[in-house]
Image (cartoon, rainbow, N blue to C red):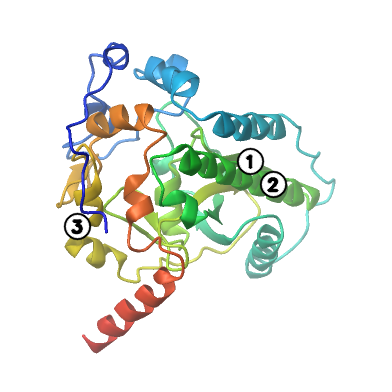
Amino acid sequence: MGEVKEETPFKARGEVLALLPDTSGNDINGLGEAQKRHASPIMWHDPGILAHGDLQNWFFANGTAPGANEHRASNQEFTAKPLPELAAIAADWEPEEASAKVKEAALMRESDIVGIARLNQDWVFEGYEAPYEWIVVLGVAMDWQCLKTAPSHKSQIEVQNQYGRGTRAAYKLAAWMREQGWDAHPHGGPLAGPVLMIPAAIEAGLGELGKHGSMINRRFGSSFRLASVMTDMPLQADGLDAFGADDFCANCKVCTNICPVDAITSEKQTVRGDTKWYVDFDECILYFVENNGCGMCIGQCPWSRTGTAPRLADKLARRRARR
């Protein structure tokens, strides 16, 4: 599975190439930088502040399937509704009890998985603010039968559908938290918010970073999307969940081989002072915008196949225990 690239090398359209800025996206991301710094917005923020803003606009105008746009429009309509006013009296719960209630509320409001982390200000994008102490990270599962067809209209529609569900889950949870008297700020994709979602998800115990640059969860593999709620409700942090995905990725070559533009490397790289898996932005984005948002790497990831992730995580855990 995942061993065949396109027969002819991909070549971006002239009209797309003309939209590229002079600055490399890898430079904006901080590839090769030894010093830590805040991430710079690069895609999926307000296009007016982005070097790649014209490219982002082209994608939404020309590179998305009609069904995907319908989900995106519905998502925007949902987020335009105001959140409820804060209750006059805040619920007086101990952090452990509050966390349990928040997780229960999240799972009752369209989330499939949920974790809690103390909000690290290092995760905040340059130029943005996140004046909260906690972040509740939500995950919503995708239909792998759709995702594995990537890049296709079918997979792109499923991605937008689940981004919408994640957004609804975040807004519904934030509304519930405000009804308990605690401020809450929700966010869901496909556009980015003030905080890098993946570091928060890792810290909240939702999994590990995969070689393909996306999360791997012990239940859903790479077949899920993220949303979040920031809050000052006193909560209790979850621990990391390192179940062996990183070690697995070091030896697996599926996403490296399947990527049509060789954007996924076999070695970790230094990015803004951290050594981690990194996908070449400049190579990936051109194929992404012209090919239904791509997603081949996560669609073909061995972890994503329905029912595989729990068995694989257990196998790796037993192997670790023997060591």
x then y, percent, for residue 260: 23, 39
- Report the residue marked by disc 1: 185
Give the class, few, some or many, for how many residues have Cα within 10 Å of label 3's Cα (few <14, many ≥20). Answer: some
Type of amino acid under label 3: Lys
**Residue beneath disc 2:** 174
Residue 226 in the image: state x and y as whole percent.
51, 49
The reply to whether residue 217 is visible in this rendering is yes
Choose mark 2 or mark 3, whichever is in front: 3
Q: Which residue is mark 3?
A: 253
Q: CA distance from mark 1 to mark 2?
A: 6 Å
Q: Look at the numbered discs 1 and 2 and tell me whether their residues touch, using CB distance below 8 Å.
A: yes
Q: Disc 1 on helix, strand or loop?
A: strand
Depicted 297 relative to depicted 289: above or below: below
Looking at the picture, does residue 57 appear above or below residue 45?
A: above
Q: Residue at x 45, y 20 (%)?
A: 62
Q: Secondary structure at mark 3?
A: loop
Quarter holding the N terminus?
bottom left
Q: Residue at x 68, y 43 (%)?
A: 171
With 201 as the anchor, is 282 left or right in this view?
Answer: left
Residue type at the position of mark 1: His
Name the residue at the bottom extreme.
Answer: 322
Amino acid type of the residue tagged 2 in the rendering: Ala
* Relative image position of residue 284 (x, y in whole percent): 27, 34
Label 3 to label 1: alpha-carbon separation: 39 Å
Q: Which mark is residue 26?
A: none
Classify residue 185 by image quadrant. Answer: top right
Question: Which quadrant holds the C terminus?
Answer: bottom left
